[in-house]
Image (spheres, rainbow, N blue to C red):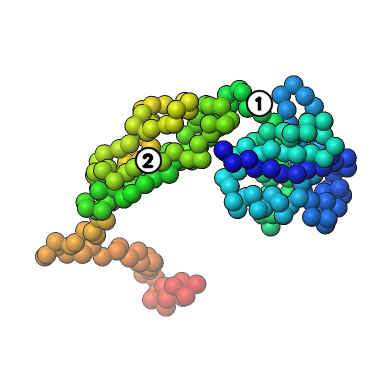
Amino acid sequence: MEEIVLEAELREGKGRASSKDLKESGYLPAVVYSHGKDALSVKISRGALLRLVHQHHLETSIITLKIKDDKKAKGRPCLIKEIQHDPVGEDIIHVDFNEISLTETIKVNIPIETKGEAAGVKQEGGSLEHLLWEAEVECLPTNIPKSIEVDISALKMGEAIHVKDMAFPSGVKCLNDPAAVVLHVVAPMKEEAPAEAVEGEAKEEPEVIKEKKEVPAEGAPASEAKEKEKK
């Protein structure tokens, strides 16, 4: 397993003003959480983190966090708990790390990737639906797979791949429902043609409601009736 190292320094200031100063100097605020210990406030290089983001799948990668002046000279093995983004500019503004033990099992979500093209799509014109995108697994941190690959080449129209059909590496236990559907091939939806009018059938005309005219009373002059209509 490749070791991913990220350098950090202890951080004292907190709040927006401190975060702004860090950003201007090329750093990001971060917190390291450890079971049974107080959280540790640190700062990390923004550029170094972005390089790791582009090179690795950080959600499932163990990062050795080497904190300057830390008693743990070998570094702290961590998983990224959360990366917070600016809701407007989408820039990274804060990172949370979880310190872990390399000898204790943990639960993580692993992406599910497909291999090949389904026969039901290629030969029968069906549509592939991907329902489960991640698998929850339990394993030692050193055994975390980057992804779970599923070969869909033999998948025909109307067939499905369930969690129980997937193969996991030795030492990796899947926690999802074995009967859950991961992928399946369905027939394409048919567009309903508009109903055609039957030959000889008369089209119904919309009813027009006309204003009711007043009928002049018996014996009343016609000029009086016309005067009422004008009003």
Taking the spot 51% from the left edge, 40% from the top edge, the residue there is 146
Amino acid type, label 1: Ser
Location of residue 220 in the rendering, given as x and y in whole percent from the top left corner? 39, 71
Residue 22 showing in the rendered view: yes
In the picture shown, does residue 51 fall above or below 161? below
Label annotation for residue 150? 2
Q: Which element is circle 1 on?
A: loop
Label annotation for residue 36? none
Tell which residue pokes out farthest to the bottom in this image.
223
Taking the spot 85% from the left edge, 44% from the top edge, the residue there is 15
Q: Which element is circle 2 on?
A: strand
How far apart in space, not on screen, are marks 2 and 1 (Cα)? 30 Å
Location of residue 59 in the rendering, given as x and y in whole percent from the top left corner? 59, 40
Q: Is 145 in front, or is 119?
A: 145
In the picture shown, does residue 69 fall above or below 106? below
Location of residue 140 in the rendering, given as x and y in whole percent from the top left corner? 56, 27
Which residue has dot 1 on it?
A: 101
Quadrant assignment, res 163: top left
Taking the spot 74% from the left edge, 35% from the top edge, the residue there is 75
Quadrant assignment, res 30: top right
Residue 92 showing in the rendered view: no
Q: Is 227 in front, or is 139?
A: 139
Quadrant assignment, res 155: top left
Contact between labelled residues 1 and 2, with CB atoms less than 8 Å apart? no
Amino acid type, label 2: Val
Tell which residue pokes out farthest to the left in this image.
200
In the picture shown, does residue 79 fall above or below 177? below
Which comes before the other along the chain, label 2 or label 1?
A: 1
Nearer the observer: mark 2 or 1; the answer is: 1
Count of all numbered marks drawn on residues in the image = 2
